[in-house]
Image (cartoon, rainbow, N blue to C red):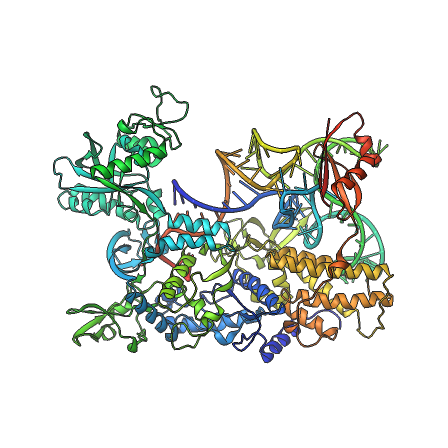
RNA sequence: GCCCCAGUGGCGAAAUGGUAGACGCGGCAGACUCAAAAUCUGUUGGCCGCAAGGCCGUGUUGGUUCGAGUCCGACCUGGGGCACCA
């Protein structure tokens, strides 16, 4: 009895859950199944508050569904391959495997301390040979399906370290370690043919009713299906030289003033062989690296090749061929025609290099004689002019007409083009899933036989030097060709870590199965609720959708979409502190003082004032990272969970504040004191005429209903607000000196409250449940039911507006007809006074909500 | 550069197109205390007013509607993604 002691209580209940095995999902359970999953973490070493929020949100859902009678699968694993382990290996000489295993151990313990209802018996890490070996088997399956192929891809090349860099490792065009200027290079790479599913991935979005619209929209734009024209231009002096371009604006073809090739276009490379100036220009273009953001934000640069092509619609028009740094090789044909008047990028380019600007779309109401394009391209609708046979047509009509004409004369064809590119999966790195391929001088690239899987990573790789240590490991590389038996070499590329995360959810139902996907997988999939960061809106989620379809077509899965419902949560931020000299200061070194309503921060040690900055994403460099472990030590994890869940809607960013945490801690204690003040031994009564008891019962049932609805709608912050209200109602009906009827109502209310807080503050809930003699564990108890009849109100207060402004209110029976409410309103003296001298012209009555009188 | 999202009191926020600001934090006042902390009670969008009450108010701006924080257009600011960070 007395103050709630989280330290003692929390550990005890975690032990009780573990002993009872309450979070194990069972195959032999007849109840309906529910698969709840949060995006698995990269084992960086520490759980940060962002993780805590992500898993707390998922845990609310898992615990809620369990209480609602579902057989819940709520597993956890580790996305364990990746760059940070290699960096640790390079910097500290630690084996990436040992580093990862150690991190997993400490993070597992931290996650467990959060009180998450996870079935740990299904845990795995993607760096386990048992997992990546299955992934290699999946690779062989994709190979058989024809979804694996090899072609040249563009990579960031560090010429000093002679190594491929990730985009993240390119800082302002330079290698992060070497500082050397990075160049874009072509390299033979393994690809997955995701584009084969482009249409299906696009169409499938329509069926994802429970995904956020913004995610679907982002994926739709990413896939980027467009209808346009593939058109061939021929060089004026050498007609056998063809350049194909793709355009979505064939209607503007008569406004063309140049052709632009990507610096990576084969023709550009060919011409560069005999033109040193062009070669130098291409080298300059390639210094931007491979990222689209870098390429498209760079200053627009061009180089005139001197070649001219004939306009396919009018042989009297000749267009110069340029090489430009803003044309992407990977989209369309890697070459465009420039129509400066109707495309802003082309216009900027034309202005810079003095190319003609010829408007061919006349905006509505504009005069053909005077219409000019100056600094802004016209991209709106209008009528085509100065365009021969297209004159007078609308933009859309002209597109069709241009495509039809091109097909008739044989210079082009209508085409559907996707922005989506095939998935380059090869990585020149040692800490990843080896690609199960062997290169044989006689047989070419052949796959490793299934019986020889897994292809294991060798132990003791040397990460101290830049580059892929697998490529240097001649012992590991050397292997007999499985086809001809002759000497051959293993593929030394490993798979993109996105491959690891593209199917892990299908492994949890049967995590020790001999096959990649075990027999019980289809009984659990799809994941009913997936929770993770919005930053994964496109890549991870799209790859998982692709892989699910590929596995379906291998006969391993019976679903097309992996995630039935998706919820994307926001980040956790924290305000930043800086000393007068600009140095960042950690939050716990700062003391906050109030001067009236003004917050000031000083260094706790010296009293030096600090500058309080904006709340920003937690990061080491800003020193504003808060670890959940520290919080739990003082207030317990339940307070931390309550705060993270209550302060902001889960889809939005939340700012971590000590004050907010203390508020949650107060709630924990207020709840506990309500349970603590009722012994459970009182003689209870059920007097229906005791209005205080009836009021409390109504509050309890209302809380059960509104908390339930809030959880179902993912409005977890509102759910906690309803809990606050409920506790307030209990406080207003204290046990001390209460009537037997009120004590009875309190007993019922406490039973409801203990179960309602279960998903949010699970340890506290158990302690409360035990104090009122609840049966078993809250974690196993059923969700509280509520009685609608008890909540229903007989009368409603209805606001009355006159001309849209609130001017009074009336009482009306719940559900009263519009006619009845109208009568009440027009008899109300206050309303009548307001209406003096006016005529009521129309009355809007919204049942049980509002009345609006239109008068004048 | 392109795609997506968000913007409401001092702060985090709430609000099926129907009383803007629930709930929490902070502030202010009071109770308890020798005192402080903790706790409890009340109060708290701005302006005007003794009061009753009135006017204004959801980033800016224009529109749709009997009625707009919510829907539509333009703009501003901040955030996420851009294919090798995960």
The image quarter containing residue A830 is: top right
Asked if residue A34 is positioned above or below residue A353 in the image, the reply reads below
Q: Is residue A673 visible?
A: no
- Residue A236 in the image: x percent, y percent? 14, 35
Residue at horizontal 29%, vertical 49%? A330
Q: Is residue A628 left or right of residue B2?
A: right
Residue at horizontal 18%, vertical 45%? A267
Q: Nearer the viewer, residue A77 or A275?
A: A77
Residue at horizontal 64%, vertical 70%? A763
Q: Nearer the viewer, residue A515 or A116?
A: A515
- Residue A400 in the image: x percent, y percent? 32, 36
Question: In what quadrant of the picture does the N terminus of chain A appear?
Answer: bottom right
Residue at horizontal 26%, vertical 27%? A388
The image quarter containing residue A752 is: bottom right
Q: Nearer the viewer, residue A50 or A552?
A: A552
- Residue A793 in the image: x percent, y percent? 77, 53
The image quarter containing residue A281 is: top left
**How many numbered circles does the render carry?**
0
- Residue A175 in the image: x percent, y percent? 32, 54
**Furthest residue toward top:** A369
Asked if residue A809 is positioned above or below residue A612 in the image, the reply reads above
Q: Is residue B56 left or right of residue A457?
A: right
Asked if residue A687 is positioned above or below residue A713 in the image, the reply reads below
**Furthest residue toward bottom:** A19
Question: In what quadrant of the picture does the C terminus of chain A appear?
Answer: top right
Q: Is residue A81 visible?
A: yes
């Amino acid at each position: 009895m007395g103050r709630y002691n989280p330290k003692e209580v929390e550990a005890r209940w975690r032990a009780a859950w573990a002993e009872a095995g309450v979070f194990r999902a069972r195959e032999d359970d007849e109840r309906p199944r529910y698969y709840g999953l949060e995006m698995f973490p990269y084992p960086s070493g520490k759980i940060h508050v962002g993780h805590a929020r992500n898993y707390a949100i998922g845990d609310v859902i898992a615990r809620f569904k369990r209480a609602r009678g579902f057989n819940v699968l709520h597993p956890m694993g580790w996305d364990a391959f990746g760059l940070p382990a290699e960096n640790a290996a390079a910097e500290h000489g630690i084996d990436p495997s040992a580093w990862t295993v150690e991190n997993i151990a400490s993070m597992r313990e931290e996650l467990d301390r959060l009180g998450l209802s996870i079935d740990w018996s299904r845990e795995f890490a993607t760096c386990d040979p048992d997992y990546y070996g299955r992934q290699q088997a999946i690779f062989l399956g994709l190979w058989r399906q024809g979804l694996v192929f090899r072609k040249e891809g563009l990579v960031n090349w560090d010429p000093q370290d002679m190594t491929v860099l990730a985009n993240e490792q390119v800082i302002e065009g330079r290698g992060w370690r070497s500082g050397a200027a990075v160049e874009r290079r072509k390299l033979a790479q393994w690809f997955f043919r995701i584009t084969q599913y482009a249409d299906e991935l696009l169409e499938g979005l329509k069926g994802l009713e429970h995904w956020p619209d913004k995610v679907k929209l982002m994926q739709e734009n990413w896939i980027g299906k467009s209808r346009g024209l593939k058109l061939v231009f021929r060089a004026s002096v050498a007609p056998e030289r063809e350049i194909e371009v793709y355009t979505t604006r064939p209607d503007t073809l008569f406004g063309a003033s140049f052709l632009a090739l990507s610096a990576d276009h084969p023709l550009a490379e060919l011409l560069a062989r005999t033109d040193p100036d062009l070669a130098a220009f291409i080298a300059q273009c390639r210094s931007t690296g491979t990222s689209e953001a870098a390429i498209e934000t760079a200053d627009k640069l061009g180089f005139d090749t001197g070649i001219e092509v004939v306009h396919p619609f009018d042989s009297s028009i000749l267009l110069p061929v340029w090489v430009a740094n803003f044309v992407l090789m990977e989209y369309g044909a890697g070459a465009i025609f420039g129509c400066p008047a109707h495309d802003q990028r082309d216009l900027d380019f034309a202005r810079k290099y003095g190319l003609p600007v010829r408007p061919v779309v006349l905006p509505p109401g504009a005069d053909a004689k005077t219409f000019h394009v100056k600094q802004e391209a016209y991209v709106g609708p209008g009528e085509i002019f100065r365009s021969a046979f297209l004159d007078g047509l609308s933009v859309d009509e002209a597109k069709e007409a241009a495509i039809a004409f091109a097909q008739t004369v044989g210079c082009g064809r209508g085409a559907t083009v996707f922005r989506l590119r095939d998935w380059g999966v090869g990585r020149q790195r040692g800490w990843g899933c080896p690609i199960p391929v062997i290169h044989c001088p006689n047989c070419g690239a052949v796959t490793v036989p299934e019986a020889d899987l897994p292809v294991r990573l060798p132990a003791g790789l040397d990460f101290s030097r830049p580059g892929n240590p697998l490529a240097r490991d001649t012992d590991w590389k050397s292997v007999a060709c499985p086809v001809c038996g002759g000497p051959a070499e293993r593929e030394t590329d490993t798979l993109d870590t996105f491959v690891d995360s593209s199917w892990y959810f299908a492994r949890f139902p049967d995590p020790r199965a001999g096959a990649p996907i075990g027999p019980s997988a289809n009984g659990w999939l799809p994941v009913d609720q997936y929770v993770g960061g919005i930053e994964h809106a496109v890549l991870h989620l799209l790859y998982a959708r692709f892989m699910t379809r590929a596995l379906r077509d291998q006969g391993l899965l019976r679903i097309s979409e992996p995630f039935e419902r998706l919820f994307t949560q926001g980040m956790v931020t924290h305000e930043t502190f800086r000393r007068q000299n600009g140095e960042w200061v950690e939050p716990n070194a700062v003391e906050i003082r109030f001067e009236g309503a003004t917050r000031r921060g000083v260094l706790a040690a010296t009293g030096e004032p600090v500058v309080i900055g904006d709340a920003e994403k937690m990061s080491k460099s800003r020193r504003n990272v808060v670890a959940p472990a520290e919080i739990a030590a003082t207030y317990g994890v339940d307070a931390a969970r309550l705060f993270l869940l209550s302060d902001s809607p889960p889809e939005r960013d939340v700012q971590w504040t000590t004050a907010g945490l203390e508020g949650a801690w107060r709630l924990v204690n207020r709840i506990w004191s309500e349970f603590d003040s009722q012994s459970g031994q009182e003689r209870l009564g059920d007097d229906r005429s005791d209005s205080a008891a009836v009021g409390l019962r109504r509050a309890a049932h209302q809380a059960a209903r509104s908390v339930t609805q809030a959880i179902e709608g993912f409005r977890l912050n509102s759910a906690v607000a309803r809990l606050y209200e409920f506790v307030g109602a209990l406080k207003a009906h204290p046990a001390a000196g209460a009537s037997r009827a009120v004590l009875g109502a309190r007993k019922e209310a406490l039973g409801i409250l203990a179960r309602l807080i279960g998903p949010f503050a699970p340890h506290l809930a158990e302690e409360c449940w035990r104090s009122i003699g609840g049966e078993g564990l809250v974690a196993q108890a059923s969700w509280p039911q509520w009685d609608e009849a008890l909540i229903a109100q007989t009368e409603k207060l209805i606001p009355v507006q006159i001309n849209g402004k609130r001017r009074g209110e009336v009482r009306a029976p719940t559900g009263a007809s519009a006619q009845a409410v109208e009568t009440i309103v027009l008899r109300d003296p206050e309303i009548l006074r307001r209406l003096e001298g006016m005529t009521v012209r129309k009355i809007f009555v919204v049942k049980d909500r509002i009345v609006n009188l239109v008068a004048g």
